[in-house]
């Protein structure tokens, strides 16, 4: 089955297509620019794969958490395309896509000392995204026996409240994302950082497991994952936070 994947939850726009055992991918500016460039990126990747839109059998969508504008863009475009094509959507957690991208980068690097390698093929990934407003989006996953398992579901947290699963105590862990400077010391855990964005290619690698677990839904049911209702601070709140962070 030919698949299209769309991921715009962060400051990177990512689109990918899988067909005939190959993957074609495009990365570009996301955030506020995602709505302007997403459809053009979809058509560009389809052209590279020598496919038409009606060749697509399912759409994988990064559902969040992440940028409010980015999530709305991915959702609306995925729904519009899926309705028109008469296909389903695979809404996949952005933090899981981030963990999968970290795993892929580690495997491509061929490190002989990668965390988790000594524990019967179990790899542990703590996925972290800057949620703005002084908070983080976090989740904890294990990759074992070729499948992903969620140990901590996606959550929005203050940095001081972040903690690894108790089952990981004393075990090596990959931390994946671009928020290393915001994450405090987690009880002295031996974290190895992998700088990465969630990507559409990662969504495609997750698609088989998602479909096997029954994650495919009709377009109307493919909704963003919002972890908080408030998406921005007021001017007064920003000024107060700046005053509190100023050196005394």
Image (cartoon, grey):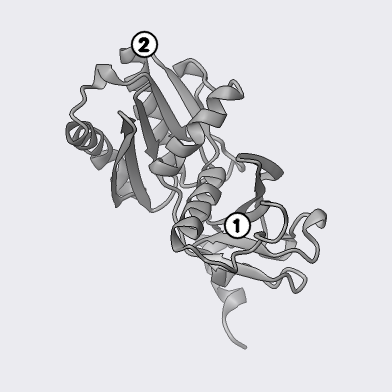
| Image location of residue 98, percent across then percent down | 51, 50
Earlier sequence position, callout 1 versus callout 2: 2
Q: Residue furthest top?
A: 86
Q: Nearer the viewer, residue 140 or 156?
A: 140
Location of mark 2 (residue): 86
Q: Position of residue 31 (x, y in %)?
A: 36, 49
Q: Is residue 73 visible?
A: no
Crowding at dot 1, Cα within 10 Å, few <14 / some 14-19 / many 20+, comes out as: many
Q: Quadrant of residue 54?
A: top left
CA separation, marks 1 and 2? 36 Å
For the residue labelled by badge 1, is the local secondary structure a helix, a strand or a loop?
A: strand
Q: Which residue is mark 1?
A: 136
Q: Is there any visible trace of residue 10 in the rendered image?
A: yes
Front-most of 8 and 55? 55
The structure residue drawn at horizontal position 56% and vertical position 30%, both measured from the top left corner, is: 209
Q: Residue at x 73, y 70 (%)?
A: 189
The image quadrant where one finds the N terminus is top left
Residue at the bottom extreme, as displayed? 248
- From the image, which quarter does the C terminus lie in? bottom right
Rendered location of residue 62, percent (x, y)? 47, 37
Disc 2 is placed on an element classified as: loop
Q: Give whichever of 226, 57 is nearer the camera.
A: 57
Q: Nearer the viewer, residue 129 or 172?
A: 172
Q: Nearer the viewer, mark 1 or mark 2?
A: 2
In-image side of 224 versus 30 (left or right):
right
Give the total of numbered labels.
2
Q: Is residue 237 left or right of residue 169?
A: left
Q: Residue at x 61, y 42 (%)?
A: 227
Q: Where's residue 160, x and y in %? A: 72, 66
């Amino acid at each position: 089955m030919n698949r299209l994947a769309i991921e715009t939850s962060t400051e990177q726009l990512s689109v990918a297509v899988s067909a005939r055992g190959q993957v074609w991918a495009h990365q570009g500016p996301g955030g506020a620019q995602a709505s302007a460039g997403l459809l053009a990126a979809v058509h560009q990747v389809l052209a590279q794969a020598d496919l038409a839109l009606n060749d697509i059998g399912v759409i994988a969508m990064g559902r969040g958490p992440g940028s409010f504008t980015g999530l709305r863009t991915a959702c609306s475009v995925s729904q519009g395309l899926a309705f028109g094509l008469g296909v389903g959507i695979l809404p996949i957690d952005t933090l899981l896509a981030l963990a999968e991208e970290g795993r892929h980068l580690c495997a491509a690097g061929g490190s002989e000392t990668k965390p988790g390698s000594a524990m019967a093929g179990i790899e542990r990934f703590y996925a972290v995204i800057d949620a703005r407003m002084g908070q983080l989006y976090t989740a904890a996953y294990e990759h074992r026996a070729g499948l992903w398992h969620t140990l901590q579901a996606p959550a929005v947290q203050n940095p001081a409240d972040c903690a690894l699963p108790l089952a990981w105590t004393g075990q090596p862990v990959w931390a994946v994302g671009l928020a290393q400077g915001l994450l405090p010391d987690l009880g002295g855990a031996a974290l190895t950082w992998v700088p990465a964005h969630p990507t559409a290619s990662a969504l495609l690698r997750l698609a088989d497991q998602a479909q096997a677990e029954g994650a495919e839904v009709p377009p109307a049911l493919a909704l963003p994952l919002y972890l908080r209702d408030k998406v921005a601070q007021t001017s007064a709140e920003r000024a107060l936070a700046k005053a509190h962070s100023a050196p005394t």
